[in-house]
Amino acid sequence: METTPRGNRLHIAIFGRRNVGKSSLINALTNQQIALVSEVPGTTTDPVFKAMEILPLGPVMIIDTAGIDDSGELGALRVQRSLEVLEQVDMVLLVLVTGNSISELELEIARRVQEKKLPLIVILNKTDLRSVPADEPAEIEEKFGLKPVMTSTLRRTGLAELKMTMVRNAPVAWDEQTIVGDLLDPGDLAVLVVPIDLAAPKGRLILPQVQTIRDILDHDAMVYVAKERELKECIATLNRKPKIVITDSQVFLKADADTPPEVLLTSFSILFARNKGDLLTLVAGAKAIAKLRPGDKVLISEACTHHSTEDDIGKVKIPRWLRQEVGGELEFHFSNGNSFPANLSEFKLVVHCGGCMITRREMLARLAKVQEAGVPIVNYGVCIAYLMGILRRALSPFPALQEMMDEIDVDID
Ligand SMILES: Nc1nc2c(ncn2[C@@H]2O[C@H](COP(=O)(O)OP(=O)(O)OP(=O)(O)O)[C@@H](O)[C@H]2O)c(=O)[nH]1
Ligand SMILES: [Mg+2]
């Protein structure tokens, strides 16, 4: 156990009484049959470390543990072993079952986790067994000081919300997110598509392009740069297929046509949306666009105060495209800088800037704030990708997100 390399992997332990569905939760989060599940209480006896990928968190180490209510001498030993895991983790998921009373065991775990200042997420599982009475989550919130995430690992509900909660609660060091390097192995080829049009600055590349090149080089992969006109020839010239093509959104459709379907294709905006925020939250926000109706309130929010140009993306273009999409007038409000309007919950959607001037952590905090108000949030890049009909292919490096794009049902009322 001590020899497990921690690396950059976020270590997440799952605690709870026997049979609450801890192992099932691991299978549900990864969409694979990784952990042993059975109706016999006490199936998992020792802490089991599993390295895996959970989007949008990235590479994680999940630690399945034995039930904290295991009894007898052997049981006590198992509980001890489970608790030792606490020394090695960055986050704890505590699983409860609807209808079961909360015991001192769970509260003790929560106390220990909070003593260590580790993020704790309380999960109320098996919500398929009965309709959860309103006072149950309220009681949990009172006892643990935080709202539970309701799941059914059997019916696979609540998982998107759980993942978002995990992202929101991930510890500080975790926010050093690469741009694309984690998708590449050393020696992989990447092709960047950079249009040189009137909007391109004279004599140089723009920062996101330069940062992407640097990130690819940092990960010992190779990078080729072409304009959209030369993309097809560029790919044909390479003696093996590139792993990924990254394009400016403006020429996405051309890049889509010229990139073989087996090659991953995405845009700089999508990569930076992930780098700066939580792609899953933003994709869920994009899906809310389909539910907008004429007359709805939409907040366009920019983290910094920059002077707006005539055809400003936030003030002019996005409102115009959203009106076209909805087929009627929308009530746009604008906010700048640190704070959101007090009546945040009245909005049906928040469209946020890319956050180039704020840190990832700040951006995640802003996403969380809007979500707390029960409002879906999307950023400029993901919003435009959705409106252009390219979001699905642009998510091709993130198959789990593509899949979730169909699953997520956003309620904006
Ligand atoms: N109805 C329902 N049953 C579930 C759900 N999640 C898990 N189960 C069932 O609960 C039983 C226990 O699931 P496990 O995942 O093995 O539970 P565990 O917490 O890992 O149990 P131990 O390893 O014994 O501590 C199995 O029969 C699962 O099929 C759920 O959301 N709804
Ligand atoms: Mg188990």
Image: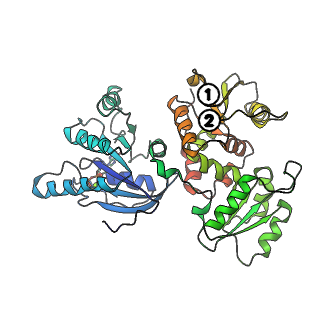
Give residue 222's position: percent from left, percent from top: 68, 71
Disc 2 residue type?
Ala
Q: CA distance from mark 2 to mark 1?
A: 8 Å
Residue 239 visible in the displayed image = yes
The answer to which quarter of the image holds residue 246 is bottom right
Residue 226 drawn at (x, y percent): 81, 64
Mark 1 element type: loop
**From where the camera sits, is residue 66 visible?**
no
Whether the residues at callouts 2 and 1 have beta carbons within 8 Å, the answer is yes
Direction from residue 192 to residue 45 in the image, left or right: left
Q: Which mark is residue 288?
A: 2
The local crowd at label 2, few if under 14, some if 14 to 19, many if 20 or more residues have their Cα within 10 Å, is many
Quarter of the image with the C terminus is top right
Rendering quarter of residue 140: top left
The total number of labels drawn is 2
Q: Residue furthest left?
A: 73
Q: Residue at x 34, y 53 (%)?
A: 13
Residue drawn 31% across the image and 34% down it? 144
Please identify the residue farthest to the right as the structure is shown. Answer: 198
Horizontally, is 101 left or right of 163 in the view? left
**Residue 322: horizontal and vertical position, in percent?**
74, 33
Which residue type carries mark 1?
Answer: Lys
Name which residue lies at 69% across and 44% down.
Answer: 381
The quarter of the picture where the N terminus appears is bottom left
Residue position marked by numbered label 1 in the rendering: 348
Nearest to the observer: residue 316 or residue 283: 316
Relative depth, front residue between 294 and 352:
352
In the image, residue 221 sits, relative to residue 168, either above or below, namely: below
Q: Which one is earlier in the sequence, the residue at label 2 or at label 1?
A: 2
Above or below, comparing residue 105 to residue 43 in the picture: above
Q: Residue at x 63, y 31 (%)?
A: 349
User: Ligand 2, what quadrant?
Assistant: bottom left
